[in-house]
Amino acid sequence: MTRRIATGCLVLLMIPAAVVVYFWYTVWHAGHVNDERRRDAVASILRHAREVEGDTRRALDRSGSAAGVDALTGVIWRHSEAPLIAYDPAHRTFTATVSEAAFYDQEAVLLGGGPSQVTRCLHLTFAHGTGSAWTSAVAVRDEEGCRASRSIGSWASLAQDRIGNMYARDLTLAGVRRALDPTGRLGYYDVRTATREGRHSTITVLIRDARLTDTAAQCYRFVRKLDSGSVTALPLTACPAAHR
């Protein structure tokens, strides 16, 4: 009888021990799988960034030496979709700042599984030296380095939507200013010009990330078809002087 009781107690003790071991293994396995999936997601971001870098560099080479700075900025924009593109005339260098994201399925331990996201802040640099070919590089920066780019990108998208929803008769300098900043207190938009030619209206806006002490800014040109809500957006190196 004593032996049976001891055996029963041993079995009862082994059950929670087995549960603990199984839970530990499940946690370890899920963590291992998630780390691997996260690394794969980051690798896919960097792989795509290198592809964009190469495609953009080749497009810049095809643009020819006669292309202006704004035209080259447009080439970089079309390939990278970077909201913030800076130009350094002293070194003939463009720097495109963009935040890229990738998703992966997170393995659940008990609850909380499902899609998860990783982001990386990328600086794509394109330089034109004394020769005819462009050189390029990709660098990963701290996420703080993309805050201005993300903010300007969001405000540019909002401006594109609002301009697209305006009545054609309101696409004047004053009308666009009211549409983008009704109270005049946002500080993100500085509408510089609004001109009309044929069936198109062209608006230039300096968009600032006003939250930063060292304010970042990017000029955008929006072209709106007057007979529809279609609007294209293109970053410019510099904005024209403001019309009053």
Image (cartoon, helix red, strand yellow):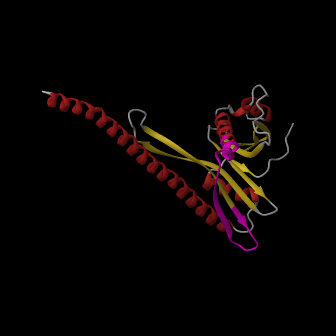
Residue 227 lies in the magenta stretch = no
Quadrant where the image shows the C terminus = top right
Residue closest to the eye, 9 or 18: 9
Q: Residue at x 42, y 38 (%)?
A: 114
Q: Looking at the image, can residue 79 be seen?
A: yes
In the image, residue 33 lies at what x, y percent?
41, 47
Q: Which residues are magenta?
A: 126-150
Q: Quadrant of residue 60?
A: bottom right
Q: Quadrant of residue 111?
A: top left
In the image, residue 97 lies at what x, y percent?
67, 51
Residue 134 lies in the magenta stretch = yes
- Most distant residue in the left direction: 1
Quick check: 153 above or below 168? Answer: below
Q: Residue at x 22, y 29 (%)?
A: 9
115 sits left or right of 135 in the view = left
Quick check: 29 above or below 9? Answer: below
Q: Looking at the image, can residue 199 be seen?
A: no
Residue closest to the eye, 113 or 227: 113
Quick check: 237 above or below 91? Answer: above
